[in-house]
Every structure is written in structure tokens, then in C-alpha cells.
């Protein structure tokens, strides 16, 4: 492809993974620029994975100050108050990540992701929003879609022992191996807004309950003006009311979204590290696929629930885009 | 999820991790984050550069240090108040006995080889400690739970030994590149740089092999003052030229085969190589270590590039020269190591020249290294996912939540929408010789096989015993241990060289042997059946162990692949080493219906490969073929 060869140092370091995805994919990876916001457990895992894989650069956004809570499920922050006092989560994670792979450029971008203009996103190949509000997800996704170049867009959330990934690769061409021959494929992705607007009756049969439950929680947080994840058992009554309304609006029975699942999502504010490792691993794998243009990508939602142990892919696109 | 009961189960648990490599690093991190406070970790390996792309607890400055220790120190930095104990040791060492295992609530494996996995399985069974087993290769992985009496043990399904090739395919009639690699590595490299006294099939077998063998041996001896290049050319002409020519004389061999072409150095290389050996440019710098390599002085940089016959021949001579010029002291006791750059170069060149001779496509150094070193494809993401799944199963085991145990496959392509596919564990196999003590049957020629053959090929290789003891009736025939006196050792050594039928207590048709491993607390019965002849191609070991049967299917499902798109990836096995088994689930809640394929490849890298899923087979086969 672009002619430049991997250095001897890169070949030695990446030997085992080049054996998985090939030298071309590795070259594309080393030229990719990734923007990541909301650095909690799952995103921490994701960052570790892509830094190890050897992307070109990772830009971190998270202005929260490091607190006891931020330490949970985050192995990038040493629990030494004197070391992290006054620093933001992004700053301290940046220091740790640099150490993982000196060949990757890791930096911090301050400020609020949702207020950035469209041009800002043009410098990236991949944008990942961790634990964002519905409005932020929509807004950033729309900006990415306005750009002439394709920016791969992902969101990820983990609550209790459940996780959700959303993927928008717009019009995406890639190659995959079928027996001995390599075939070209093309997929069309809906935007976040389009995907979550699909009437519930039209979603595929046996769509996982988590998909609907996450939409209920999203609606609750938006209507109550809550930050993502800022809810407790006290909010359950309100959440159940919103669920009722949504089920009515979608003409489905209320059993579509089990109360017990909503209760888990409302109360499970502590991240479950094994689920973070799993969801962060899947997300990194998808980003590596998208950057290298190799292999079937996930379209367009992924769910993991430690309670049944299933990792499920759901394709929720309306008829216009699919 | 974060219930009180769960947290106290985690906090109070004492956990043993075996392996601090690809899975191990991720596992130790996730255990610590999840609240585990008492973790012991065993690993005999030290850190290498090629580990750093995924074993994220290690840095370049740690290369050469103990994995277990560095992993411990790294995790204590973000969880300083937990107890982690590291052991830089082999899990098969006698100090890790049944009593050692008994102190743990659960054992978690992140191992890279079948041998150690079987050993740990037996100790867990003997100590009655639950085991969570795992493995990854590329994007594929699996986690299984083994609880004595409740689920199958690790050995309830056959785990085929690493692939072996018939001797004559390697020495005389290679048809695939891997045959050339095995020849270059196990025969030529071993002959030139390894123990000279080892038996070696390097010379082509001819009908009157015995007469000329003495003469041929001398070719490999280098005279004190012999010029290294001349010596190299002599070896070259012998193994690629006259040996092939000799082989061609056996017309019978080539009736239905493509005839190889003898290659002599003078046809490929100039009269004298201008190359000065011993110059500084033979050292390349990788990560601060000075590596002796033949490539830089020949202007070869890219390990993924395909070299032609001339380049391979130049590398062959140059690498051989460098061994004698720079690493003379090691000659005579070298064994092939995939991390030894010069050895990889030599083996690549030799395999390629042989491949050229036999009309087999050549391969790059990168590819040849992968084949020669049985290198496992490995990425960080799969290891992280698998480690997360291990912790989830470990927590269920600690809560004794037996109904919720699952074995989980991590897939590259979704099957019924699933990328992570949980399946209910199987019941123990009632005919498993490890956990159910079922007798085995050994067919062997009792007049022509020595006790040593039985020990090497069956007791060690097939049964995976570490400190075996063999009894025939009341008579003790053989035993390993450090508490034996000299007379016993002499006695056992004498027995090893005897034919079975001539032992003090003769083993003949109908004999029943007891074979035990005291460390593993495993005992099994072997019923002996005398047999005269064995097929050299199909039964190269000259003996057949059986009696271990696949468990019957409970639900009559056929062993066909499911209707998922991945089925097209499944290729036929040429070796017959894959076994189709049928599922014996504890119940039938999972409608999944796959042919279960098991195949193992041992590697000395840190992630293992073993796959029990039809979708996964083709990916691996590429490496094995």
C-alpha cells in the first residue's frame, strides 16, 4: 500500500499481532489517530488495547479531577493522592499510557467534547465517546458525518455488569478472506439518531432487552438533566414511568423491558472490572478492524451481560439506511 | 452484581494463577481490580521483546526478568494493599504438590502448553480444587470450568499430541514447506550445532546405508584449520547436492513423485565470496541488544521479503560462518530457539534451499520463523476478553453457583448473533482414564519394544506423567524420583534397556500394568496386547494406546456443522488428528449444535492454542500445515 515499511523495531515488537492481521494492517494502524472521551473502566481497557496495538496517536478528553471513585476499575491511576492531586483523569491516564508503548503519541485535549466544532473532528480517524449523554452522542455523530473524510464513530457504556457499544462507519468498504480469496464488501451504517429512532416493533426479532433498557435510561437522564450514570434506586419509580410511556409510544407491551433489568442499570454505578475488560476488548478489536479495513465489522450495536455471559451483536437500522 | 455475598467471597478467596504471559497479565490486572486480595502466581518464563505488544505489565527495561515477579510488582503499583506472591518456577516442580494446591479455593490457568495443562488438571483433581482453564489464538479464545465430579476434567476429551511427521517424509520425500523446516531445524541444525552424539537421520537412507555411514559422518567434522567458508560449501554440497543425488538413485522412490534437483554451491554462488566475516556490520541493534545476524552484511532488511535461491544460499553460508566465528563456544550444545536470530536465519535458508530442490514454494524469514517456532498468533484484545471471562467464572466457582458455570467461546465471526458464546459445561466422561480410572489398552510388540520405548512414547508422551512408576503385579519395574538409592537406579536403568518380554517380570500378551505418578496422584491400568507388525506411516511409534473412548452422544445429534456462515471456513484435516465428538451437556438449554473439533499445537510462547470449535479450525490449520 503506501510504500512505507515497518521499522525493524516495529516488526520485533508487533511480531505476534502481525501474524494475525498482516503488515499492511499494522502500517495503517500506525498512521491512525484516535480521539477518546470519558475515561472510566471500559475506556481505560480500550485505551490500553489500542496503545499496545500501536496506533499512531491517542488523544484523551476527561477533565474530571481524580477522585476515589475514578480509581475504581482504572489501573492507569496509581492510588497515591500526592501523585494525582489536582490532575485530571485524562492527564494522569496519559502519563500511564505513554509508558505502555513509546511508539504511540498520547496527549490530552481539554474542554467539553460536545461544544467542539466540526473541524476539530477532522484530524481524527476514530472518535470514541465513553459514558456520554444522548445529546452529546447525537451531536458529535452528526459532526463526524458532515466531514468529507470518513471518521469512524463509536460510543460505549457500562452499567452494573452490562455493556453497550454503538458503531457508525457510514458507508464502509472493507476486505475479508473467504477461504483462499479476498473479497470486497460494503456496508451502510445508520447514524446514532437514525438507529435509536427505529420503532421498537421494527427491530429484529429477539433483540436483546438491554437495547431497550438503555434507551429508557437515556431518556430518563435527558429528561431529568442527569449526567450519565448519575442515578440511584430512588429514581427507579421515575424510570419505570418513562419505560411505560416509551412502550406505549412504540405499541409494545411493558414486558418488553424487564423491571429487574432497569433496576440493575439504575443501581449499578460501580463498574464491574471483568465486564469492562470484555467490552473494552471488543471495542478495541472493532476499532482495529475499521482502521485496517479488514474483516467484518460489528454492525451496529454490541451487548454484553455477565449474568448470562452472552456477547451479542444487534443490527438495528431502519429500512432506509440498510 | 456487586452484592455483599459476592464481595466477601472474592475478598476471602485464595487464588492460584498458573502463567503470567498474555492471558496472565490481563488476568492478574482484572483480579486485582475486581477485589481479589490473595493471589499466587507461578511462571517459569522471562520477558522477551515480542511479549511487549500485549503483556502490558512489562516494559522494555524488564526484558530478561521473571514474568511472575514483574507482573506482581506492576499490579501492586495500582493496588498496593493486596497480597500477591510470585514464583519464578516450573509448575511441574515437586514443591507444587497436592498439598500446595489444596490451600487454594480456585486455580486459574493461563498456560501455553498441553503438558503443563494436563499436569495442573491432575493436581486440581487430586487436591479437589476447581480449575478454570483458558486459551487464545488470534481473535479466538475459550474459557472452561473443571470441577471434580460436576463437570468434565480437562482431559475428558482427547487432546492430540503435537503434529509429528513420518521420518521418511522429512528425510527423503518432503512435499510441504513445513517438512523442509523440520528437516532444517531438527536434523541439519541439530547435526551441525547440537549434540554430535545424538542419533540423526540426516543422511538419506539408501538400501545399503550401513556401508557408507562412517564416511558420511566425517563430512560434518570440521578440521582444525579448515576455512569456514570451504567447510560451509562442503556441507552445502553434501546435503543439497550429493545427498539428493544419492536419493535419486533409488528409482523406486520417484516412480510416482516429482524428482528433486540436486543443488551445488558452485552453481549458485561465486567462486569465492568477497564477504569479510567478523566485520562489525554483522551486528544489528534491536532494542539495545546487539544481535548477531547474517542479514545486514548481505543487505537484507525486511524479514517479510521472499529470498531467492542465491540469497538463501548466501544467508546459509554467512550464518554458518558467523556461528563458527562468533559463537564457537555454543557449538555442540545448541538447540533451536525461535528467538535466536542467527538460528532462525540459518534454518530459513536451509529450508528454502531444500524447498527449491523439491519444487516446494519458498517462504520469507518471518513466515519460516512462525512455522519453526510454532509461534502462536496473539493479540492483546482477545487475552483481555478471555481474562474477563475467567474472572466471571472464578466468581461463580467461589459462590458455588454450579448451575451457572459456562464454557465460553470467543469467536471471530458471530454465530447466531453471538461473538461471545456461552455453552453449558459437559459432564465428566465416564471412560476418562484421568478422572474415572478406566483401564487403557496398549498394543505393542513385546519382543521388539524396550521398556524405554514404553516410558518415552507412552508414559511420558501420551499419559503426560512427570514422575512415573511402573508396576507389573507386585514387581516394581521402573520409578523416577530423587529419593532412590544407587542400586535401585542401576536396576531401573538396566530394565529400561530390556525388551518387555525379557524383563524380570516379563510383560507379555495379556499382562496388566499399573502406571502411577505420585506427584499427580494419578494411577492407571494398562492391559497389554502383543502385536507383531505396525504401519510405519500410520503408526510411527510402533505401538498404539487405546481404550479411551469418546463419550456417547446423549441427544443423537449428528456431528455436522451448524448453518452459520463460518462453516465454509472449515477445511478437511489431512492428519486425522482432529476428533469429532458430540456434546454431553448437563441439560439441553443451548440449541447450539456444532461438530466439536479439538486440535492442539504446542508452542513455547506464552499464549496457547487449542481450539474446540469448528469455526476455529481453519485458522489454525494454516500454521500447522
Image (spheres, rainbow, N blue to C red):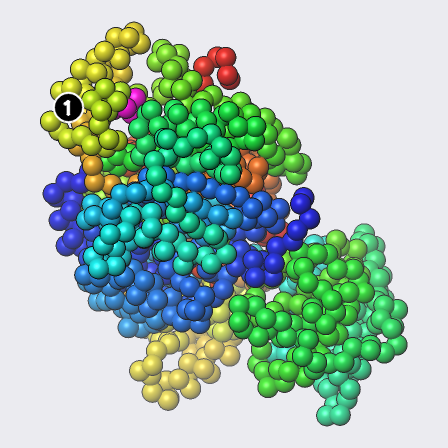
Residue sitting at 74 percent across and 69 percent down? B298
Q: Secondary structure at mark 1?
A: helix
Q: Position of residue B20 (x, y in %)?
A: 36, 61
Q: Position of residue B130 (x, y in %)?
A: 25, 52
Decide if residue A87 is in sight here: yes
Query: For the N terminus of chain B, which image quadrant?
Result: top left
Residue B187 sits in quarter: bottom right
Residue sitting at 37 percent across and 34 percent down? A113
Q: Is residue B321 left or right of residue A136?
A: right
Q: How many marks?
A: 1
Q: Is residue B273 left or right of residue B12?
A: right
Question: Farthest residue toward the bottom?
Answer: B224
Which sits in the foreground, B429 or A227?
A: A227
Residue sitting at 85 percent across and 78 percent down? B272
Which sits in the foreground, A163 or A204?
A: A163
Decide if residue B577 is in sight here: no
Image: magenta residue range: A213-218
Query: Which secondary structure class fits the magenta region best?
Result: helix
Q: Residues within 10 Å of mark 1 (few under 14, many from 20)?
A: many
Whether B590 is among the magenta residues is no
Q: Which residue is mark 1?
A: A236
Amino acid at each position: 500500500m503506501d510504500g512505507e515499511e515497518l521499522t525493524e523495531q516495529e516488526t520485533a515488537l508487533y511480531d505476534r499481532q502481525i501474524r494475525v492481521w498482516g503488515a499492511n494492517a499494522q502500517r495503517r494502524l500506525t498512521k491512525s489517530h484516535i480521539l477518546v472521551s470519558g475515561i472510566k473502566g471500559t475506556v481505560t481497557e480500550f485505551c490500553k488495547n489500542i496503545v499496545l496495538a500501536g496506533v499512531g496517536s491517542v488523544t484523551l478528553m476527561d477533565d474530571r479531577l481524580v477522585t476515589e471513585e475514578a480509581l475504581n476499575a482504572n489501573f492507569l491511576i496509581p492510588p497515591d493522592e500526592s501523585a494525582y492531586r489536582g490532575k485530571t483523569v485524562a492527564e494522569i491516564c496519559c502519563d500511564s499510557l505513554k509508558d505502555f508503548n513509546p511508539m504511540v503519541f498520547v496527549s490530552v485535549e481539554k474542554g467539553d467534547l460536545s461544544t467542539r466544532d466540526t473541524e476539530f473532528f477532522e484530524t481524527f480517524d476514530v472518535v470514541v465517546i465513553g459514558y456520554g449523554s444522548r445529546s452529546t452522542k447525537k451531536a458529535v455523530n452528526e459532526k463526524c458525518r458532515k466531514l468529507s473524510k470518513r471518521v469512524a464513530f463509536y460510543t460505549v457504556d457500562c452499567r452494573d455488569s452490562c455493556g453497550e457499544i454503538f458503531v457508525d462507519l457510514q458507508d464502509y468498504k472493507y476486505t475479508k478472506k473467504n477461504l483462499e480469496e479476498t473479497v470486497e464488501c460494503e456496508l451502510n451504517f445508520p447514524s446514532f439518531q437514525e438507529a435509536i429512532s427505529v420503532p421498537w416493533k421494527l427491530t429484529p426479532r429477539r433483540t436483546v432487552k438491554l437495547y431497550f433498557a438503555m434507551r429508557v435510561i437515556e431518556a430518563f437522564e435527558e429528561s431529568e438533566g442527569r449526567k450519565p450514570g448519575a442515578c440511584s434506586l430512588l429514581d427507579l419509580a421515575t424510570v419505570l414511568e418513562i419505560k411505560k410511556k416509551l412502550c406505549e409510544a412504540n405499541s409494545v407491551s411493558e414486558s418488553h423491558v424487564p423491571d429487574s433489568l432497569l433496576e440493575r442499570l439504575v443501581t449499578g454505578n460501580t463498574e464491574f472490572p471483568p465486564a469492562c475488560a470484555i467490552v473494552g476488548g471488543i471495542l478495541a478489536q472493532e476499532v482495529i478492524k475499521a482502521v485496517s479495513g479488514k474483516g467484518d465489522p460489528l454492525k451496529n450495536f454490541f451487548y454484553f451481560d455477565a449474568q448470562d455471559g452472552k456477547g451479542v451483536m444487534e443490527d438495528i437500522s431502519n429500512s432506509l439506511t440498510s | 452484581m456487586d452484592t455483599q455475598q459476592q464481595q466477601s467471597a472474592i475478598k476471602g478467596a485464595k487464588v492460584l494463577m498458573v502463567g503470567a504471559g498474555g492471558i496472565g497479565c490481563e488476568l492478574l490486572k482484572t483480579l486485582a481490580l475486581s477485589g481479589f486480595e490473595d493471589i499466587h502466581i507461578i511462571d517459569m518464563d522471562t520477558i522477551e521483546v515480542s511479549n511487549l505488544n500485549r503483556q502490558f505489565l512489562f516494559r522494555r527495561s524488564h526484558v530478561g526478568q521473571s514474568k511472575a515477579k514483574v507482573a506482581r510488582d506492576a499490579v501492586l503499583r495500582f493496588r498496593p494493599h493486596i497480597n500477591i506472591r510470585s514464583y519464578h518456577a516450573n509448575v511441574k516442580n515437586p514443591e507444587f504438590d497436592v498439598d500446595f494446591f489444596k490451600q487454594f479455593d480456585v486455580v486459574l490457568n493461563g498456560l501455553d502448553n498441553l503438558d503443563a495443562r494436563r499436569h495442573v488438571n491432575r493436581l486440581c483433581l487430586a487436591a479437589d480444587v476447581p480449575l478454570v482453564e483458558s486459551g487464545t489464538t488470534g481473535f479466538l479464545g475459550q474459557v472452561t470450568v473443571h470441577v471434580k465430579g460436576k463437570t468434565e476434567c480437562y482431559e475428558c476429551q482427547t487432546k492430540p499430541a503435537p503434529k509429528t511427521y513420518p521420518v521418511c517424509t522429512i528425510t527423503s520425500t518432503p512435499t510441504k514447506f513445513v517438512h523442509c523446516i523440520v528437516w532444517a531445524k531438527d536434523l541439519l541444525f541439530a547435526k551441525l550445532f547440537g549434540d554430535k552424539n545424538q542419533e540423526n537421520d540426516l543422511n538419506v537412507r539408501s538400501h545399503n546405508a550401513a556401508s557408507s555411514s562412517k564416511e558420511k559422518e566425517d563430512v560434518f567434522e570440521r578440521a582444525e584449520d579448515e576455512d569456514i567458508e570451504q567447510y560451509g560449501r562442503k556441507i552445502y554440497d553434501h546435503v543439497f547436492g550429493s545427498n539428493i543425488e544419492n536419493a535419486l538413485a533409488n528409482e523406486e522412490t520417484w516412480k510416482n513423485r516429482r524428482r528433486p534437483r540436486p543443488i551445488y554451491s558452485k552453481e549458485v554462488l561465486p567462486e569465492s565470496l568477497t564477504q569479510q566475516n567478523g566485520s562489525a556490520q554483522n551486528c544489528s541493534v534491536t532494542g539495545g541488544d546487539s544481535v548477531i545476524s547474517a542479514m545486514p552484511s548481505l543487505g537484507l532488511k525486511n524479514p517479510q521479503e521472499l529470498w531467492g535461491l542465491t540469497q538463501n544460499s548466501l544467508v546459509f553460508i554467512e550464518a554458518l560462518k558467523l556461528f563458527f566465528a562468533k559463537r564457537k563456544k555454543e557449538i555442540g550444545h545448541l538447540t533451536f530457539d525461535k528467538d535466536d536470530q542467527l538460528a532462525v536465519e540459518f534454518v530459513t535458508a536451509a529450508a528454502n534451499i531444500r524447498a527449491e530442490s523439491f519444487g516446494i514454494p519458498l517462504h520469507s524469514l518471518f513466515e519460516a520463523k512462525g512455522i519453526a517456532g510454532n509461534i502462536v498468533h496473539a493479540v492483546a484484545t482477545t487475552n483481555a476478553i478471555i481474562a474477563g471471562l475467567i474472572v466471571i467464572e472464578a466468581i461463580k466457582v467461589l459462590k458455588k453457583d454450579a448451575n451457572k458455570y459456562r464454557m465460553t467461546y470467543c469467536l471471530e465471526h458471530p454465530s447466531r448473533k453471538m461473538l461471545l458464546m456461552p455453552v453449558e459445561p459437559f459432564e465428566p466422561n465416564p471412560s476418562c482414564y484421568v478422572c474415572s480410572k478406566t483401564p487403557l489398552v496398549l498394543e505393542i510388540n513385546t519382543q521388539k519394544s524396550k521398556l524405554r520405548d514404553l516410558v518415552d512414547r507412552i508414559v511420558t508422551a501420551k499419559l503426560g506423567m512427570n514422575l512415573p512408576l511402573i508396576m507389573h503385579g507386585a514387581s516394581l519395574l521402573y520409578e523416577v524420583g530423587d529419593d532412590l538409592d544407587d542400586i535401585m537406579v542401576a536396576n531401573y536403568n538396566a530394565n529400561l534397556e530390556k525388551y518387555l518380554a525379557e524383563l524380570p517380570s516379563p510383560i507379555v500378551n495379556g499382562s496388566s500394568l499399573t502406571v502411577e505418578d505420585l506427584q499427580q496422584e494419578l494411577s492407571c491400568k494398562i492391559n497389554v496386547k502383543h502385536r507383531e507388525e505396525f504401519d510405519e506411516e500410520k503408526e510411527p511409534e510402533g505401538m498404539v494406546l487405546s481404550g479411551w473412548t469418546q463419550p456417547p452422544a446423549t441427544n443423537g445429534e449428528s456431528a455436522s456443522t451448524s448453518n452459520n456462515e463460518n462453516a465454509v471456513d472449515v477445511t478437511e484435516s489431512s492428519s486425522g488428528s482432529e476428533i469429532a465428538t458430540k456434546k454431553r451437556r448437563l441439560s439441553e438449554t443451548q440449541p447450539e449444535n456444532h461438530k466439536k473439533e479439538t486440535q492442539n499445537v504446542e508452542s513455547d510462547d506464552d499464549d496457547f492454542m487449542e481450539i474446540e470449535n469448528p469455526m476455529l479450525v481453519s485458522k489454525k490449520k494454516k500454521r500447522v500445515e
